[in-house]
Image (cartoon, rainbow, N blue to C red):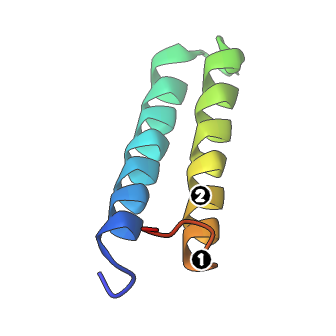
């Protein structure tokens, strides 16, 4: 909350994506293997993209001007 509403919103989105990633691993697990690793990888990359946006926000890349 100390970093502002936009940062908090980005963090919420990232947390939701991470939760979806964990659920995808559980959903696509078949025994000791995991199917649909493409979906899991895409969710992981989306989470990373959110993290980059958060870092860039703190660095001042996005302004209200």
Residue 27: image location, x then y, percent: 45, 18
Q: Does residue 39 lie above or below 1 as drawn? A: above
Q: What residue would you read off at disc 2? A: 53
Residue 14: image location, x then y, percent: 46, 51
Q: What residue would you read off at disc 1? A: 60
| The furthest residue to the bottom | 2
Of callouts 1 and 2, the N-terminal one = 2
Q: Does residue 20 lie above or below 48 as drawn? A: above
Image-based side of 5 in relation to 47, left or right: left
Q: Does residue 45 lie above or below 33 as drawn? A: below
Res 38 quadrant in image: top right
Task: Determine the CA span between mark 1 and mark 2.
Answer: 11 Å
- Secondary structure under the numbered disc 1 in the rendered image: loop
The quarter of the image holding the N terminus is bottom left
The residue lying toward the viewer, choosing from 30 and 58, is 58
The residue lying toward the viewer, choosing from 13 and 53, is 53
Q: Residue at x 67, y 21 (%)?
A: 32
Res 35 quadrant in image: top right
Number of labelled discs? 2
| The furthest residue to the front | 65
Image-based side of 10 in relation to 30, left or right: left
- Secondary structure under the numbered disc 2 in the rendered image: helix
Q: Does residue 14 lie above or below 36 as drawn? A: below
Residue 19: image location, x then y, percent: 41, 42
Q: Residue at x 60, y 38 (%)?
A: 46
Res 33 quadrant in image: top right
The residue lying toward the viewer, choosing from 43 and 13, is 13
Q: Which mark is residue 14?
A: none
Q: Residue at x 43, y 34 (%)?
A: 20
Residue 20 shows up from this direction: yes
The residue lying toward the viewer, choosing from 38 and 47, is 47
């Amino acid at each position: 909350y100390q970093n502002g509403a936009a940062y908090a919103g980005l963090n919420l989105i990232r947390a939701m994506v991470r939760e979806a990633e964990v659920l995808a691993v559980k959903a696509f697990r078949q025994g000791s293997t995991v199917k649909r690793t493409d979906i899991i990888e895409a969710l992981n990359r989306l989470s990373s993209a959110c993290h980059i946006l958060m870092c860039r926000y703190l660095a001042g890349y996005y302004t209200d001007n």
